[in-house]
Image: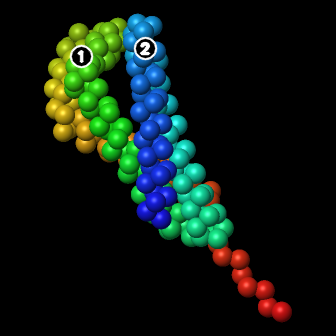
Amino acid sequence: MKKIVYRYGWYAALFELIFFILAWLIFGLAKVQDPALQGNLGWVCIICPMIFVYFGIRYYRDNVNGGTITLLKALQVGLLIVIIPTLSYALIETVYVIYLDPHFYERIMSNEADLYRKTLSPAAFSAKVKEMKEHMAVYKNPLYNFMAMVLMIGALGTIVAVISSFILWRKQPKAVLA
């Protein structure tokens, strides 16, 4: 099982890295500054590689376990696979926002502030901006940023592992009495 977990976990991590680099190059070369588009593409970069959780559980079920798998075993395999892409994406994202693009959160805050300026009263707006600045200061801490990404991606990966486990769960066929 360890070999399958490593294989499919590293496939997902590599896929995340490739997606991240492609998105970075596309947005960097095209000078796209649309935060909604960047956010949506970021979610795609996180969600798509989680397909390897499904494939890893299926491979384990079909090639190692003789075509059957319990729900708990499928969940165990899926959650173990999720650990690798979770940690790798958290590391990639933390390095990016702390070292490669240190103004990342400031741009997001600026865009959100523009939206809030249009909808909130001046007093509520200044309170919201103060709150956003406090959040931004926390996210600039590499350890906090890393842990926040681990929790977010880990939660998403857990959901994918649970869904995949239910889809792939197959009980042992009952013995036929002759």
Q: Residue at x 48, y 44 (%)?
A: 11
Q: Earlier in the sequence, mark 1 or mark 2?
A: 2
Say what secondary structure mark 2 lies in. Answer: helix
Q: Percent x, y for residue 157?
A: 44, 47
Q: Which mark is residue 56?
A: none
Q: Which residue position is annotated with label 2?
A: 27
Q: Percent x, y for residue 172?
A: 66, 76
Disc 1 marks a residue whose amino acid type is His
Q: Quick check: 161 above or below 147?
A: below
Residue 25: quarter of image: top left
Q: Percent x, y for residue 109?
A: 27, 17
| Number of callouts | 2
Say what secondary structure mark 1 lies in. Answer: loop
**Relative depth, front residue between 130 and 100:** 100
**Relative depth, front residue between 119 and 76:** 76
Q: Residue at x 37, y 44 (%)?
A: 86
Q: Which mark is residue 103?
A: 1
Res. 46 visible in picture: no
**Relative depth, front residue between 105 and 29:** 29
Farthest-out residue, bottom: 178
The mark closer to the camera, 1 or 2, is 2
Q: Quick check: 68 above or below 96?
A: below
Q: Residue at x 83, y 92 (%)?
A: 178
Residue 101: quarter of image: top left
Q: Residue at x 33, y 12 (%)?
A: 111
Q: CA distance from mark 1 to mark 2?
A: 15 Å
Q: Percent x, y for residue 44?
A: 50, 31
Disc 2 marks a residue whose amino acid type is Phe
